[in-house]
């Protein structure tokens, strides 16, 4: 219990700096400028239909091995 209180106190003492200290609106503004700059320079990746389809198909799939939940995972570890 004391450990949790200590961790909370440490979290409160840490100040947010840089990007994290900015408002969400300001963060979005800066991030969108980066995207626009890449397109203006011609270095941004533009997806074609096939690439977009392949990426969508991969969405949600685990890379590497598939995880099982709970005790089913024990046979993998042994």
Image (cartoon, helix red, strand yellow):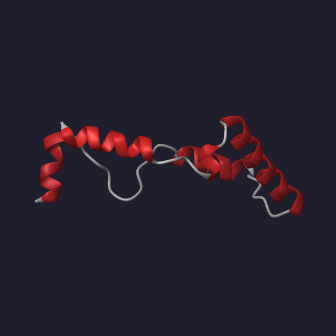
Residue located 75% across and 47% down the image: 30
Question: In the rendered image, which quarter is residue 63 located in?
Answer: bottom left
Q: Position of residue 59 (x, y in %)?
A: 52, 44
- Asked whether, in this view, residue 74 is left or right of residue 3, the answer is left
Q: Quadrant of the C terminus?
A: bottom left
Residue 69: quarter of image? top left
Vertical arrangement, residue 62 with respect to residue 5, above or below: below
Quadrant of the image occupied by residue 24? top right
**Quadrant of the image containing the N terminus:** top left
Residue at image point 18% right, 48% down: 73
Q: Is residue 12 above or below residue 44?
A: above
Q: 71 or 26, which lies in front?
A: 26
Residue that sits furthest to the left in the current view: 78
Foreground residue, 21 or 72? 21
Give whichever of 7, 64 is nearer the camera.
7
Q: Position of residue 58 (x, y in %)?
A: 52, 48
The x, y position of residue 4, in whole percent, is: 25, 39
Residue at 89 percent across and 57 percent down: it is 40
- In this picture, residue 21 sits left or right of residue 61: right
Instruction: State the residue at coordinates (83%, 51%).
Output: 36
Q: Percent position (x, y) of residue 31? A: 73, 48
Looking at the image, residue 38 sits to the left or right of residue 12; the answer is right
Q: How many marks?
A: 0
- Residue furthest out toward the right: 40
């Amino acid at each position: 219990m004391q450990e949790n209180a200590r961790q909370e106190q440490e979290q409160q003492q840490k100040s947010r700096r840089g990007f994290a200290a900015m408002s969400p609106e300001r963060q979005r503004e800066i991030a969108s400028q980066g995207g626009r700059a890449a397109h203006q320079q011609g270095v941004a990746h533009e997806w074609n239909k096939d690439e977009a389809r392949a990426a969508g198909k991969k969405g949600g799939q685990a890379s590497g091995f598939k995880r099982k939940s709970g005790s089913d995972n024990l046979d993998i570890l042994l």
